[in-house]
């Protein structure tokens, strides 16, 4: 029913995000959901010891005898977290001198010290490396303020997180989509510096999301307005998140019997935590592929076909679509009332 309503509303014309097609009534619909199809799930990790006396126990481990940052990085389940990422997140100058019994923050890049709850984005002193890049970061922060994506650290360094947000800007405004640095003085930088709001999405359906795999972000829209923007991680090579062009989300599983974590039938885990094979409150849009929460969302595609958001972002997403308080499984696209679009292609750089 929802797909027919969208087709009538679009009248065969394209739905646009900037000037780039995100949906069309004339496009071929994806295959209907198959309840018996295997679900896209995450493999179980090497067990970690999570202490309970920290700000976020799911993001902190206790270093064990014989551990090193390289061993820990290799044991990280299905993520892009590296030796250098862990060292930078924890302010470790000599990564070979870590001590057993010490705590290590393994949720990198979320601008939170998960050991004590400190906000890394409010560090008192930040040296500006390149003022032109810093100006881009300030403008991106102003443009995306309140949408849900983390504020960029204004340091004048165009790293992976800054490049992700620059890519999201290009995607929203219909520019050629890439995660490349933005050349100072270029036409796209002039556009960035001249706008104060995101463009309207003419002809968009009542409630929609667009996952841009190039940028690794998800836009959420209410009619012609973009109301949310979140960082995501999509399917890795061999398990790609399938392109969608106006698909209906058809199933929601609150997994109330397991604190919101849907147990993987393919990769069962003995202990439930946000780093194992389970998916937090998945919303399915194409057979076993779903939008779900996780405590590890790298800046590149490293899931098994699903679209991962940070748990807090997924909770905000569920609240937005009116499912935050639901405690029953829903198999009804009209009740969920969400159109899903997926496009783009990630290229490792």
Image: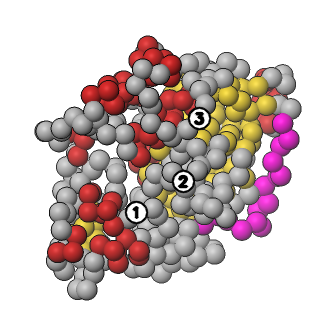
- Span highlighted in magenta in the image: 27-41
Instruction: Say if mark 1 contacts mark 3, CB within 8 Å.
Output: no
Question: Quick one: SS at disc 3?
Answer: loop
The disc placed on residue 81 is 1
Question: Quick one: SS at disc 1?
Answer: loop
**In which quadrant is the N terminus drawn?**
top right
Distance between mark 1 and mark 2 Cα atoms = 15 Å
x, y percent for residue 42? 56, 68
In the rendered image, which quarter is residue 133 located in? top left
Q: Residue at x 71, y 52 (%)?
A: 242
Question: Quick one: SS at disc 2?
Answer: loop
**The one of 236 and 326 positioned closer to us in this rendering:** 236
Q: Nearer the viewer, mark 1 or mark 2?
A: 2
**The one of 131 and 108 positioned closer to us in this rendering:** 131
Q: Residue at x 58, y 50 (%)?
A: 347
**Residue 132 placement, left or right of 74:** left
In the rendered image, which quarter is residue 115 located in? bottom left
Distance between mark 1 and mark 3 Cα atoms = 25 Å
Identify the residue position indicated by label 3 in the image: 177
Identify the residue position indicated by label 2 in the image: 348
**Residue 174 placement, left or right of 230:** right
x, y percent for residue 193? 41, 18
Q: Is residue 122 visible?
A: yes
Instruction: Say if mark 1 contacts mark 2, CB within 8 Å.
Output: no
Is 13 inside the magenta-drawn segment?
A: no
Is 34 inside the magenta-drawn segment?
A: yes
Reading the chain from its start, which is encountered first: label 2 or label 3? 3
């Amino acid at each position: 029913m929802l797909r027919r309503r969208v087709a009538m509303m679009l009248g065969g014309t394209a739905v646009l995000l900037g000037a780039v097609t995100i949906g069309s009534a004339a496009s071929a619909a994806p295959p209907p959901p198959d309840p018996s199809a295997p679900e896209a799930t995450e493999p179980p990790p090497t067990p970690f010891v999570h202490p309970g006396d920290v700000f976020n126990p799911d993001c902190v481990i206790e270093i064990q005898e014989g551990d090193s940052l390289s061993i820990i990085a290799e044991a990280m389940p299905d993520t892009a977290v590296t030796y250098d990422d862990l060292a930078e997140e924890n302010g470790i100058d000599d990564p070979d001198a870590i001590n057993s019994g010490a705590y290590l923050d393994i949720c990198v890049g979320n601008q939170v010290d998960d050991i004590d709850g400190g906000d890394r984005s409010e560090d008192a002193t930040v040296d500006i490396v390149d003022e032109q890049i810093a100006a881009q970061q300030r403008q991106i922060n102003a443009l995306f303020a309140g949408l849900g994506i983390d504020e960029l650290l204004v340091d004048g360094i165009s790293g992976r997180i800054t490049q992700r947000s620059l890519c999201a800007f290009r995607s929203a405004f219909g520019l050629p989509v890439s995660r490349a640095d933005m050349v100072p003085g270029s036409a796209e930088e002039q556009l960035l510096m001249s706008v104060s709001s995101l463009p309207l999405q003419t002809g968009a359906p009542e409630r929609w999301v667009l996952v841009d795999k190039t940028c690794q972000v998800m836009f959420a829209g209410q009619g012609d307005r973009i109301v949310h923007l979140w960082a995501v991680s999509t399917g890795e090579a061999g398990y790609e998140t399938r392109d969608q062009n106006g698909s209906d989300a058809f199933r929601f599983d609150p997994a109330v019997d397991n604190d919101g974590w849907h147990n993987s039938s393919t990769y069962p885990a003995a202990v439930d935590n946000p780093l194992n094979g389970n998916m937090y409150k998945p919303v399915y849009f194409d057979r076993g592929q779903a939008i779900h929460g996780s405590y590890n969302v790298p800046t590149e595609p490293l899931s098994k076909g699903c679209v991962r958001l940070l748990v807090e972002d997924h909770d905000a997403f569920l609240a937005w679509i009116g499912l935050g308080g639901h405690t029953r499984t829903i198999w009804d696209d009209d009740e969920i009332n969400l159109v899903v679009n997926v496009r783009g292609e990630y290229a490792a750089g």
